[in-house]
Image (spheres, grey):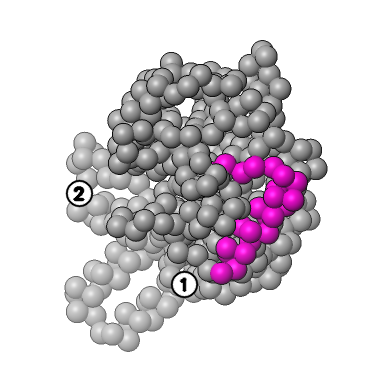
Amino acid sequence: MATFLHLSDVHLGYNRYNNGERTKDFFYAFEDCIDRYAVQEPVDFVLIVGDLFEHRSIQPSTLNQAQIVLEHLKKAQIPVLAIEGNHDNCPYGVKTSWLRYLAEQGWLILLEPEEDSDTLLAHWDPDTGRGGYIDLDCGVRVVGSRWYGASTPQAIKKLAQALQTLPEAPGKTVMMLHHGLEGQIARYAGALRYEDVLPLREAGVTYLALGHIHKNYSEEDWIFNAGSVEANSVAEGWGQMRRGVYRVELNGTGVAAELKQDYYQRPIYRLLLEADKSWSQVDLENQALALVERENRQQKLQGAIVELRLQGQVGFDRLDLNFRDLHDRLKTLSQALIFLLKSELAGSAYLEPLNPDQHLNREAIELSVFKDFLAGHHIYQHHLEHFAQGLSHLKQKLLEGEAPDPLYRYATDLRLTDLRQSQP
């Protein structure tokens, strides 16, 4: 029986939200899952199926983070086998990458097919540090690949043919591929169909270790995608997307893959406030503050990443909302590491559509238009008829040439009458 850890999409050096603590989260998550599931409970080998780094060009601190974690595995004499993903592969015209550097320094084994060679998959040579597959002492063959992008289906056919020409494997065959299957996430162009990867199974692959898609999924007990080690966005946060690392056993009966998630990860919470168009600007702000205060008592938002989305219709000009001030107040209240305030608010543009079958006269149409105009502000919503009639009379007085002072007194009296009616 052989045991290994399958992970991908570590994204060391991630720097979204311009927060240094958030960048460290990816290192902490990587280190913790390796220590828990590969070192403390020893495995025969570890797979990193692409995107160890967030960027092709990395900072010295990011390289140091990778070496710290890989040092744990080196001390435990656990081999690390890796392939490049779309984030850390060689740019066009460049012959090396930071993964190649780590391989040359002995931190990991980078398995790469030789595209320009007659032998697509050569056995890994410890002297040159190059090769497309390796037969491990635990009786498992591990095969590598690279990031192929849109040409992945064609590359799979070639790899499957090359697999069939190799010497007999010592046991089960595991292959790493940084690409995703269709139907797993929305708006993913170029995803593979199941039929695209089937030639690999027919060529003897027992366990196809995927990366690239940050969501955990599996297909027919031979295709496995662990997901990203840490959430790269709020949408991937806790309760939004299942992800983690796989601890896998290859035994006589087949594959036993267990998704592990109980390691360091930054909590992420998504909150929603549905606005009522009768609310004033102050009402909306108070409701948002009350929501965050409630959630803070229940879920302890301190130190987390929190997103609050404001939705619904409002009865005031959205530009009157001091968005930055509200954001700062909410962040202070929650004590979140990162607080994201997103507005999807809409104004109340129309009260009701005109029905062309009603054959309304000019006065009725005019009153309807005035009501629509007034309905956009919460102050007037409960007195639409009163104000619409008042505006109609005001317009008529204006057309009749009445002087400005009487018009102003009329408009003032109209407003004061409404205020008196609104008082309890």
SS at mark 2 in the image: loop
Q: Is residue 76 visible?
A: yes
Magenta run includes residue 81: yes
Q: Amino acid at mark 1?
A: Asp
Please rate how many residues cluster around mark 1, counting C-alpha atoms within 10 Å: few if below 14, some from 14 to 19, many from 20.
few
- Is 233 placed left or right of 199 in the picture? right
* Badge number at residue 361: 2
Q: Which residue is mark 1?
A: 320
Magenta residues?
Answer: 60-83
Q: Quadrant of residue 384?
A: bottom left
Whether tag 1 and tag 2 are in contact, CB under 8 A, the answer is: no
Residue 254, above or below 31: above
Q: Residue furthest top?
A: 253
- Is 403 placed left or right of 419 in the picture? left
Magenta run includes residue 329: no
Secondary structure mainly formed by the magenta segment: helix
Q: Amino acid at mark 2?
A: Asn
Q: Residue at x 57, y 74 (%)?
A: 325
- Is 159 placed left or right of 242 in the picture? left
Q: Residue at x 24, y 52 (%)?
A: 365
Q: Residue at x 74, y 51 (%)?
A: 75
Q: Toward the viewer: 424 or 201?
A: 201
Q: Provide residue 68's location: percent of width, then percent of height.
A: 68, 59
Q: Toward the viewer: 76 or 241?
A: 76
